[in-house]
Amino acid sequence: MDTQFLVSLTIILATFALYIGIAIYNKAKATSDFYVAGRGVPPIFNGMAIGADWMSAASFIGMAGTIMLLGYDGLAYIMGWTGGYLLLTFLLAPQLRKYGRYTVPEFIGDRFDSHTARVIAAVITIIISFTYSIGQLSGSGVVIGRLFEIDAKLGTMIGVVLIAFYAAFGGMKGITWTQVAQYIILIIAYLIPVIFMSLQITGNPMPWLSYGELVGKMGELDRELGISEYFAPFTNGTKWQFLALMFTLMAGTAGLPHVIVRFYTVSTMKAARWSGAWALLFIGLLYLSAPAYAAFSRFILMTKVAGSKISELPAWTKTWVDTGKLQVADGNGDGILQWSELVISNDIVVMATPEIANLGVFVIGLVAAGAMAAALSTAGGLMIAISSSFAHDIYYRVLKPNSTEKKRLSVARWSIVIATLFAGLIALNPPGAITQIVAWAFALATGTFFPALVLGVWWKRSNAKGVIAGLLVGLGVTLTYIFAAKYGGFTILGIIDTGAGVFGAAAAFLTNIIVSLSTEAPSQKIQEEVIDLRYPEQMVYKNGEVWMNDGTKEL
Amino acid sequence: MKKIDKEVADRYFRERTRNIIIYFIVWFLVSFGVVFFAEPLSQYSINGFPLHYFMGAQGAVITFIILLFVNAKLSDNVDKKYGIDESKNEQISSGKVFEH
C-alpha cells in the first residue's frame, strides 16, 4: 500500500459518495413534483448529462492512445464522434421528441404499427448496447487493474460487480443530476494533465494552441528514425477506410438507442435542438483535447523514455508491465530502450501519461476517478437501454401486457445483472482494443437504426415490411462484414471491420425503400403522423390541413 | 385551433429544410471534403499544424459546434416569425406524452 494507492482510492471513493449523495437527494425531492409539467432539465445541464452519458471509457481512456498510435488516421474518431451530433440534432432528435415515446423500439413499433418490428428493434438495441458495454467493462478493468496493481482481467471482474450493482440499483432513479456531476469530474480530470503537460513542455498553458509545433517537431524525429511521419495521412489504412470509419461513427451516433433516449427527457423540440448544441460544446472540450494529450504523451515517450537505460527505467514502468498492457523488451540487447522496443497498448496511454510526466499523486488519482466516472456513467445508460428493451418493449408490451409494475421492475433489474455478467465474461478476453469494440457497436447502429429512423421520420411511405426487411438485412450485412474483415481478411477498398457500417447502411436503405414501395402504403393515420413531425408542437397536421393550436379546442 | 394556409405551412417547412441542407453541405466539406483532399492540403500549415491535421483535430469540431448553435438560434427565429409560442409547445408536449 503506497501513497499513490491511498490517494487514488480516496479520490475515487469521494467522487462515488458525491454521485450517490446527489442521486438520493434528487430522488427525495423529485417524487413530489414528478408529474408537474414543463419542469424539464434546462438544456445546458441536459447537455452536460448527455456529455457524461456519451463520453465513455472509449473516449476517456482509449481515444488519445488510439490517436497516438495511429497518428492522423486516428482523427477519424474525433470527427466521427462529434460530427454525428449534426445528424442526430438536425434529422432525428426533435422529431422523435415530438412523437413522444419512451424508447427507440417503442417508436419503431408504434410508427410502423408492428409488434414484429418492435421485437426486432428491441433485440437489436440489446445487441448494440451489449457490444458497447464490453468496451466499458474492459476499460474499467484497466483502471482497477492499475489501482490495485493486479492483472487487468481481475480488474475487469471487480468492475463487473461494481457496474452491475451501480446500474441495477442506482441507475433506475433520476440519474440526470448525477451525470452532470460525472461530467464535471471527468472533464476536469482530463484537462488538468493536458494543461500541466503543455506547461511542462511548451511553457504555454493553452494546450490547444501549443501542440501544433510539437506535431511538426515529431514529424522530424520520425524522419530521423526512418518511420512514417506522425501527421502523414493514411499510413495505417486506406483513405476509403478513413472515410468509411468516419461515416460509420457519425451515423452510429445518430442511431445509438441510449443516446437518443436522452432527448426524450427534454421538454420540447426547441429544447432538443439546444440540448444537442450544448452537448456537443461540452463533448468538444474533451475531443479537442484528446489529440493534444496524444501529442504530448508521444513526445514525452520519444524524448524522455526512449533512449534511457533498461536497468534505470522509472518505477511506473513496472506497475504498468504488471497489468499486461505495456512491454519493454531490450530486443537488440544493447541495454538501451529504443522507441521501437517500447510496445504500449492504446488503452493505457491516458492512464499512464500522468505518471510518466511525473504530475504527482493527486493528478494521477484524479485521472483514475475521471476514468471511472466515464465508464460508470455510460455503462449505466447502456444497461438501462438493455433492460428497458427487454422489460418494457418485449416483456411488457408484447409478452405480458398485464404484468404488475413490481414484476416489471424486477425483470428490469435481473436483465441488467445478467447482461453485465455476460458482457464481463467476454470482456475478460476483449476481442479488440476499447475503441475498436466500441466502433463495432457504432457499425451495428449505422447499419440498423440509422436508416430505419431516418426513413421512419422523413418518408411517410416507409412501411412495416420495409423496416423489418431493412433492419434484418442491415444487421446481417454489418455483422457478416465485421466477421469477414476481422477473421477472414476480406476487405473492399481496404475498408476493415470498423468501417463496416457503410455497407450495412447502404443495404438497409435500399432494402427498406424497395420493399416499402413494392408493398401497400401505411394507413392514412400513420402517414399524417409522419408529416406532422415536420412542424413544431403547436402546429398540427390533420386531414391534409395544418392547424395552429392557439388554446381553443375543436378540430 | 386555427387553420393555417397550406402555403404558409409549406413555407415554414421549406425554410427550415433549406437551412438544414446548407448546414449539411458545410458539415460535409469540413469533414469528408478535407479528408478526401488530405494529401494536397498537407502542404499548408496553420498555427504549426499541417492544415489537414488541424482540420481533423480542431477545425472540423469547432465548425460542428458553431453549426449546432446557429441552427438552434435560427430555428428559434423561424418559429418566432411564424408565431410559435414556446410556452404553448411545452404545455402541448407535456400533455401528449404517451403514458403507460
Image (spheres, helix red, strand yellow):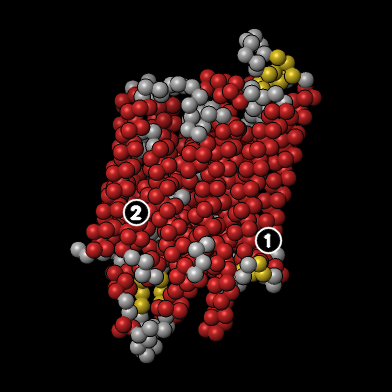
Q: Residue at x 68, y 61 (%)?
A: B34
Query: Of helix, strand and loop, which one carries label 2?
Result: helix
The answer for which chain carries disc 2 is: A
Q: In screen coordinates, is A464 left or right of B37?
A: left
Quadrant of the image occupied by residue B83: top right
Q: Residue at x 72, y 26 (%)?
A: B82
Quarter of the picture containing the C terminus of chain A is: top right
- Residue A399 at what x, y percent from top left? 40, 27
Q: Residue at x 50, y 71 (%)?
A: A202
Which mark's residue is nearer the viewer, 1 or 2? 2
- What residue type is disc 2 on? Ala
Residue B11, compared with residue A319, is above or below; it is above
Pointer 1 local density, CA inside 10 Å: few below 14, some 14–19, many at least 20: some
The answer for which chain carries disc 1 is: B
- What residue type is disc 1 on? Val
Specify the label residue B34 is tagged with: 1
- Farthest residue toward the right? B7
Res B100 seen here: yes
Q: CA distance from mark 1 to mark 2?
A: 37 Å
Specify the label residue B92 is tagged with: none
Residue A344, compared with residue A130, is above or below; it is below
| Residue indicated by mark 2 | A369
Quadrant of the image occupied by residue A523: top right
Query: Of helix, strand and loop, which one carries label 1?
Result: helix
| Front residue (pair A438, A217) | A217
Q: In screen coordinates, is A36 left or right of A137?
A: right
